[in-house]
Amino acid sequence: MLANGITLSLWLLLLLHISGTDSMKFSLFKKKPEAQAKEGEVRLAGSKTSSEGRVEIYHDGTWGTVCDDGWDLAEAQVVCRQLRFLGAKSAVNGGTYGEGSGPIWLDEVNCNGTESDLSTCVFKDWAVTDCFDTGYMLDHSLALSEELGQVFDSGDGCDFQIVVQSTTGNKQLDGTLETVQTTICAHKMILSRFPLFNTSEENTISVHVSLSCQPYFTSFIRYIYTRKADVTFSSAQCLHQMASKFGVKQLMEDTGRLFSKFLPQDVTFHTPVSLYEYSVETGDFLLKENCLQYMAWNYQNLTQSPAWSHLSVKLLGALLSRSDLVVSDEYFLLVSLEEWISQRGNLISLESQADLLKLIRFPMIPAEKLYELQFNSTLYNAHQDVYGSNILKAFQFNVLLFSTLKNNPVFKKDEDDYQARIYTATPWAATIDRSASFSTPVHNSLIFKTNVIQWEANIFMSQSDCSNRGVRCESFPTARLTAQNSLRQYQSSIRFSNQLLLRCQGKYICQVQDFKNDLSHISTNGSQGLPYPCPDGQYDYQFVVIPNYI
């Protein structure tokens, strides 16, 4: 803006005050001396300096305030103009300058920004407002939780008996199952929000819980009073189960989120397996996926665990169906399945064995391993049809061009059989510290074996690391995986879905994430959060190249 031939750059910051009287206020960089008050004049008040304050307007011989939760830059510009400032920078809600005195003169002011005076803008009418003194908020809710806990602990005034029964599994002399029970006295009013406890006529109810969960039932009832509970590795599943049964949704959701923290703590894998079975029983999809994902990412550890030989057919089938299964290669997956079937013997029907074998992605098995299957496989003779048809499919995939395969009406390129999983064996993966180079074939088909791509993998820990490579990083650490030779000739036929694996303390995979524009911003315990926490934040970084036909 030009004034007297000189370019002036002066901004006015308007602050909207919404407090007891929802008054308007703003900050000024410079203000001319006030003239004698006249009708419709505006001023700033409530500040130690003349450059900021609460907006007040003069009407009917009295200064009053402006209340408007729709106050924005247009109204601010008008006030600036009326006070002879050059412009408004912003209009924001505030609470800095206290409450105004006097009447609320204006409310729901609507300016187009070109008016010369605030009083010429559209508004309800003088002193017509729906702004009222909102008073003060007293919040003693934290103390309430503690006091309600004391009410429960003391049992004073309790009027509702809960008889908690559990069967021990032992039979009594009369042939009935032995039952142990305990009684809790609670308050009907507090429990009445939950339907299974809301019995208007009865003052006593009986509930049945498993023997292992009975010790935690008191903590469960106390949570209803206080909304607090100490959740341990031992109690989490019981609290989740009871919360699900009695409709305490918040507790169910909160304990469900805690399961991911407990899964890595059990190297025997009994916890992930039992939680999976529990999630199937209760229909908890999120918990089911959480357990399956952890076992899929750590499949090789699972095969070495005590829980491995006790997996159900359904659970193993669910794992073999996943593309995010992390294994050294597909041949390892086949061998582990054959060993599992052999261990179970006649407990697994031939039909179930065949169904599981069909989930192996034979085209992903290296060609030399395919040839050896008829000699080395322990199940080949029992399932020659399954092996024969899949080995043929795999050899065709390895020796025929993709364009030839697509011309075959039987070939379905989107079938899982033709989609690579996350393979960590050489040459498809490399574990690095800060920087390394490695090479892979363009594709795992045998015809591309001599077509090699050079890859560079980096872990950037600071902005200078990124700047030195001409890369813009949003957070740290950041991983980068780039091809060092051109991929243009393969763009129409091959897509790379490369992955970054974070292995915690060299023990278990706590995160799998993809690359976007060659970069992967690494989640940590303290940032976006890891699906499965890593106690000390010590990771091994493994880069995995995954090519697939388009």
Image (cartoon, rainbow, N blue to C red):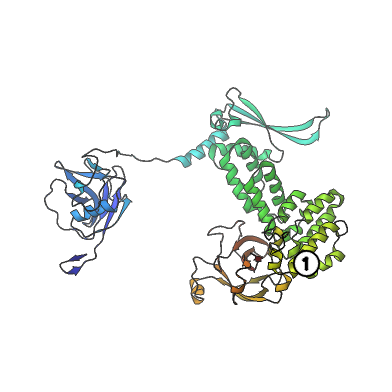
**In the rendered image, the vertical position of residue 150 relative to residue 44, given as above or below:** above
Check disc 1 and report the residue beneath it.
395
**In the rendered image, the vertical position of residue 284 relative to residue 326, given as above or below:** above
**Is residue 342 visible in the rendered structure shown here?**
yes
Pinpoint residue 241: horizontal percent, then vertical percent: 65, 41
Furthest residue to the top? Answer: 201
Q: Residue at x 71, y 67 (%)?
A: 404
Pinpoint residue 476: horizontal percent, then vertical percent: 52, 66
Task: Quadrant for the N terminus, please.
Answer: bottom left
Task: Quadrant for the C terminus, please.
Answer: bottom right
Viewer-nearest residue: 462 or 388: 388
Q: Is residue 2 left or right of residue 158?
A: left
Viewer-nearest residue: 358 or 348: 358
Viewer-nearest residue: 163 or 299: 299
Q: How many marks?
A: 1
Q: Residue at x 64, y 75 (%)?
A: 453
Q: Residue at x 84, y 49 (%)?
A: 349
SS for dot 1: helix
> In the rendered image, which quarter is residue 452 located in?
bottom right
> In the rendered image, which quarter is residue 503 located in?
bottom right
Q: Is residue 119 left or right of residue 446?
A: left
Viewer-nearest residue: 341 or 322: 322
Q: Give the residue type that dot 1 points to.
A: Phe
**In the rendered image, the vertical position of residue 340 relative to residue 63, given as above or below:** below
Pinpoint residue 271: horizontal percent, then vertical percent: 70, 50
**Is residue 457 visible in the rendered structure shown here?**
no
Crowdedness of circle 1 by 10 Å Cα count: few (<14), some, many (20+)?
many
Q: Residue at x 84, y 57 (%)?
A: 385
Furthest residue to the left? Answer: 36
Pinpoint residue 234: horizontal percent, then vertical percent: 67, 47
